[in-house]
Amino acid sequence: MKVTDLVETKIDRLPKGHVFTFSDVSSGQEGKEAVIKALNRMVRVGKLEKLAKGKFYKPEATVFGKLQPDLRQVVKDLLEREGKVIGYLTGLSIYSQLGLTTQISNVIQIGKNDIRPKVKRGRYTISFIQQKNPITQDNIPLLQILDAIRYIKEIPDTSVTSAFKRIRSIIDSLSFTDKQKAMKLALKYPPSTRAILGAVLDTTQNRIDTGSLRKTLNPITSYTLGISEEWPVAEKWNII
């Protein structure tokens, strides 16, 4: 069987929108150059789309045009490696899921323990923020909430007050155990994040002891949030 036929057979088995590389469709028996030529030929005839160097996907055609792959497909190699979690989605794509904004962006933000330069994939620009906590499947939802608190003033298409109310509602719905975990994870976030989280936890159901979190803050430092509502515990946490 020709190399082209072998490659096409393997690609036909892949779902639409699935991002793959040369190694995913090569058994090693075909010559590398021949496989690459076959892939590029399929791009030229429209059977494949090229996402970035060495990354391809089968496009799904609709009346509105060809669909881009799911965000997780675009960045999956940056989120997991050999079954181990190495990063997580954060930023606008997650703020939208959390109900903090309706704005859609071509920028994908990823939290990682190590910082790296921005990369371009298709129409997306991928940027990175440093996460000092260990990244696990269990703590990713809490890290995403803490990221939203940290960057609350940068969330687009909303006010700080609206974003704050939504974040407070999300934290209020957490279990007692998750609230404790969030408080522990917050220790590796900036002081302003710790202050806002502590103040929110002081006003939620199933209240926990936030004393240990408050002791990590400088008692003479204030944190400007600027929400337009009365918040009785704000003074306790030096939030203005």
Image (cartoon, rainbow, N blue to C red):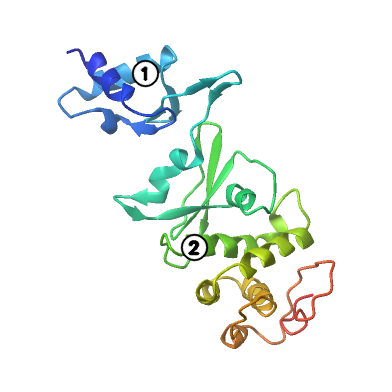
The image quarter in which residue 153 lies? bottom right
In this rendering, would 123 be left or right of 80? right
Q: Position of residue 202 (x, y in %)?
A: 67, 80
Viewport quadrant of the N terminus: top left
Amino acid at dot 1:
Asn
In this rendering, would 229 be left or right of 80? right
Viewport quadrant of the C terminus: bottom right
Amino acid at dot 2:
Gln
Element carrying mark 2:
loop
What's the residue at 48%, 33% (across, down)? Answer: 69
Circles 2 and 1: CB distance less than 8 Å? no
- Give the label on residue 40, or none: 1
Name which of mark 2 and mark 1 comes first in the sequence. Answer: 1
Q: Position of residue 21 (x, y in %)?
A: 33, 32
- Give the label on residue 139, or none: none
Per the model, the C-alpha gap separating discs 2 and 1 is 37 Å
Instruction: Name the residue nearer the viewer: 225 or 178.
Output: 178
What's the residue at 76%, 52% (across, down)? Answer: 158
Position of residue 110 relative to residue 107, above or below, is below
Q: Which residue ends up furthest to the left in the rendered image?
A: 29
Position of residue 130 relative to residue 198, above or below, is above
In this rendering, would 8 be left or right of 104? left
What's the residue at 59%, 62% (across, down)? Answer: 145
What's the residue at 66%, 76% (across, down)? Answer: 195
- Give the label on residue 131, or none: 2
Q: Position of residue 82 (x, y in %)?
A: 29, 50
The image quarter in which residue 151 lies? bottom right
